[in-house]
Amino acid sequence: MTAHSISDRHQELRSRVPSNLAWLFFGKGVAVLDSVIIGAIVARYLGPSQLGILSYAASLLAIALPFLTFGFDRILVRDFVQAPNRRDADFWLAVIFRLVLVCVVAAGGAALLHSGTIEFSSPQEYRVLLITLLGLLAVPLSVPVLLLESMVLSKWNVWVTNLWVLLAALIRGVLVFCSAPLEAFAVTQVLFSIGVGLSLFAVLAKLGQLPTLCMPKISRLRELVAECWPLAISGIAVTLYMNADLSMLRWLKTPEEAGTYSVAASMSALWYFIPVSLQSSLFPTLSLRHKQDAEAFRNEYQSFLNLIAIVTWCSLGIAYFVMPIFILMLFGEGYRLSCEVFKIHACSLPFVFIGVAIQPLVDLGRFQRPLLAVLLIGMSVNLGLNAWLIPSFGGFGAAWATVIGYAISSLGICLTPKGRPLAMMLVRSFFLCPLTSIHRALRRG
């Protein structure tokens, strides 16, 4: 691509950002309503114990995810933008590679469940875990999301996901009305994830954007693996310290304790979509700007950090003071403990937002190895604290372990030689800019 064509492409992608963000926020708004309203109805119906089993199964599925994506996601989005001539081959390479990994992991998971190595609280828990394994089939079907993201056309992903969210909400409402068993809710989750993936393939075909089927090249796979293995290990580390707390609560305490904690963690996770939506919408333009002009990229990235900082402090204030009231109103007295756990868990929001905000710089600046080292330290601290605190403090201990682990993982890269310029940018965005704005407001007052 010539400098002129890169500039034109940058302007084209940048013009799509506002509408793309609007669609992402609309889509997540529907998902939040589903999680809060339908999720509360289901949680009240199931109770903390059965909800703990369902959440435990979902956490194990989430832990398996980075083993299946192998850190390809951000690199594929980058290459879809910067090397469109390789788009077809890279698309089907990702689909086939993930399908092979899914078959291996699913077979291993089924064998582990049948072996008796894992102790189950009831036969029902065993059946739910077995059903959840089928959800792995959605992983190779998620590649169209990356292609739509690279074209800043996430509105199609939003439309498809929202239609399936509404359908799944209707089904779960019927299941509650009919007093259905826990296994039926697990089947609904699996059908939802697979249905979204198949529908996105159909959308790409309808738009004429479905890449031509071609056999992947082993040499290209080796190239991606060589670049992405630090991201894969980083993804495993991130997923472990985001989901291990729930799994360890189930192992070290009870399903009821896991269910209570899952409500607090899920209400905290609702806020993660904000930085993720901003990052996914702006990453294609940042990618092209990085290729075109280093100084222009730095200025644009600083503006991105400033935006993330404003959103972070606003989100933290609203979440800390308002969400506990909503949790008690929606989920009922059975989840009163979730409100107190949430207040601790919400303190991790600034570190999550920062972690998402620095990801473009990591992907474009090839900082994967320093980030990997920091994430491994954060994961080790998180797992160690969970093992130490959960037996004595339950969900409160898991929440504190999460906050400390997130802090180390998001800020630790600033202590590396490559991360020191990033540290100054973060200080400028998260502290100096807000303080300057407050000072100006006071002077005007």
Image (tube, rainbow, N blue to C red):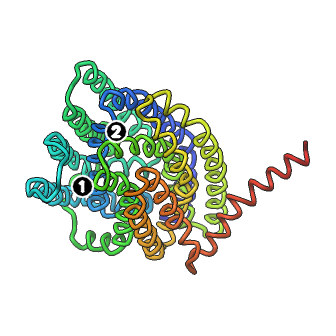
Image quadrant assignment for residue 183: top left
Q: Is residue 187 above or below residue 121?
A: above
Choose top left, top right, bottom left or bottom right for residue 300.
bottom right
Q: Please tell me the numbered disc located at residue 207.
A: 2
Question: What's the amino acid at mark 1?
Answer: Val
The alpha-carbon separation of the residues under discs 2 and 1 comes to: 19 Å
Q: In the drawing, does residue 334 fall left or right of residue 307?
A: left
Residue 294 horizontal/vertical position (percent): 61, 70
Task: Report the amino acid beneath label 2.
Answer: Leu
Residue 35 in view here: yes
Q: Nearer the viewer, residue 328 or 359?
A: 328
Q: Are marks 2 and 1 in contact (CB under 8 Å)?
A: no
Is 395 situated above or below 422? above
Q: Nearer the viewer, residue 246 or 372?
A: 246
The location of residue 378, given as percent across then percent down, is 45, 68
Q: Nearer the viewer, mark 2 or mark 1?
A: 1
Task: Tell whether 417 sits left or right of 338.
Answer: right
Residue at mark 1: 95
Residue nearest the viewer, comparing 4 with 385: 385
The residue located at (27%, 41%) in the rendering is: 54
Location of residue 29 in the rendering, given as x and y in whole percent from the top left corner: 48, 33
Q: Is residue 13 visible?
A: no
For the point 41% across and 37% down, the residue is: 158
Residue appearing at x 43%, y 52% in the figure: 150
Residue pictured at 91% horizontal, 48% vertical: 443
Q: Which mark is residue 227?
A: none
**Labels 2 and 1: the sequence-earlier one:** 1
Q: Secondary structure at mark 2?
A: helix
